């Protein structure tokens, strides 16, 4: 079935050294976060599932989610260690599929280097009072990091979506509803665009500034100087990386009132694609990354 391989933006993952400080920072931004969940997984294809040394909190949206991921036991295996050795900030870009095996075959047919699907599991508190614990299960296809240095790309099949998308977790003080776009920065933006098109099976806009995924969501590749011009913060050129996440909210006015009341440095700027108003929050308040909010 085509929906098994049509990819959409599933989530982004922000690697943070101190998970609790990240939880507090994003709660201040008005996100409802899931209780901490510790990871278990397969260290490699065909290997058994074992406890990992990382855990997370997630802000779940009607469409997609935002993951805060950090170390909870440095003695155990975890992909997070390598991410934090580079920088604290956005690293993981996960694309949702209906079937990991079929999606892996589709990636191979497009010449995308990736490992075969491997199992990942974690226990998650369940219910409005967190009175139960249920097992969340996934099948993940990890793309080759040497060929895609900007991000830790994952193609993910959710085998227990009800464990993650719990109704009480979908309501946020800031009105967040969807993870709608991801910004990437690379010195060679044209090469980045070509690879993102191939990875996601996306369609480029007429001017090439936005790549629309077949299942939903968009990628926005930029050169470092171009990204620096579109954000309303003074900063040096952002190096090659996942530069920002765009989150759709109910109301920018209500969002700004909330952030102003909490002393968050939130700044207005037109969206570079639509020219509609948007609100940006910088690395000082968002644990090393940029967040763009649109309505």
Image: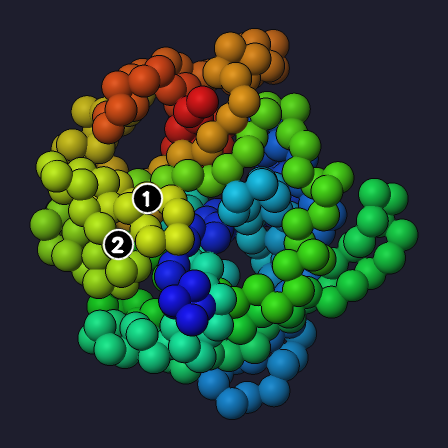
> Based on the displayed image, in which of its 4 quarters is residue 260 positioned?
top right
Residue at figure coordinates x 62%, y 32% from the top left: 31
Is residue 191 toward the left or the right of residue 213 in the image? left
Q: Secondary structure at mark 1?
A: strand
Q: Position of residue 197 (x, y in %)?
A: 21, 57
Q: Earlier in the sequence, mark 2 or mark 1?
A: 2
Query: Is the C-beta separation of discs 2 and 1 under 8 Å?
Result: yes
Viewer-closest of 176 and 189: 176
* On-image quarter of the C terminus: top left
Can you say whether 4 is above or below 33 in the image? below
Q: Which residue is tagged 1?
A: 218
Q: Secondary structure at mark 2?
A: loop
Label 2, label 1: how many angstroms apart (C-alpha)? 8 Å
Viewer-closest of 146 and 87: 146
Residue at figure coordinates x 61%, y 43% from the top left: 60
Is residue 77 toward the left or the right of residue 235 in the image? right
Q: Position of residue 185 (x, y in %)?
A: 23, 44
Q: Is residue 163 visible?
A: yes
Q: Which residue is tagged 2?
A: 202
Residue at figure coordinates x 61%, y 87% from the top left: 48
């Amino acid at each position: 079935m085509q929906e098994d391989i049509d990819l959409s933006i599933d989530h982004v993952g922000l690697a943070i050294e101190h998970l609790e400080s990240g939880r507090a920072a994003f709660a201040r931004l008005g996100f409802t976060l899931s209780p901490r969940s510790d990871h278990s997984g397969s260290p490699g294809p065909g290997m058994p599932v074992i406890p990992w040394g990382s855990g997370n909190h997630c802000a779940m949206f009607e469409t997609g989610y935002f993951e805060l991921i950090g170390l909870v036991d440095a003695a155990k295996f975890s992909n997070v260690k390598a991410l934090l050795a580079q920088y604290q900030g956005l690293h993981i870009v996960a694309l949702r599929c209906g079937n990991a095996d079929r999606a892996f075959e589709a990636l191979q047919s497009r010449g995308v280097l990736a490992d075969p699907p491997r199992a990942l599991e974690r226990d998650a508190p369940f219910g409005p009072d967190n009175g139960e614990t249920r097992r969340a299960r996934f099948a993940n296809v990890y793309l080759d990091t040497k060929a895609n240095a900007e991000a830790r790309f994952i193609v993910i099949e959710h085998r227990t979506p009800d464990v993650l998308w719990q109704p009480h977790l979908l309501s946020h003080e800031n009105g967040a509803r969807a993870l709608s776009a991801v910004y990437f920065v690379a010195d060679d933006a044209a090469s980045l665009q070509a690879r993102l098109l191939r990875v996601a099976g996306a369609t480029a806009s007429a001017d090439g500034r936005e790549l629309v995924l077949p299942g939903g969501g968009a990628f926005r590749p930029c050169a470092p100087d171009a990204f620096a011009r579109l954000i309303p913060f003074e900063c040096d050129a952002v190096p090659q990386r996942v530069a920002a996440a765009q989150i759709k909210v109910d109301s920018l006015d209500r969002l700004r009132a909330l952030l102003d009341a909490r002393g968050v440095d939130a700044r207005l700027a037109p969206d570079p694609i639509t020219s509609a108003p948007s609100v940006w929050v910088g690395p000082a308040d968002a644990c090393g990354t940029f967040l763009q909010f649109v309505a």
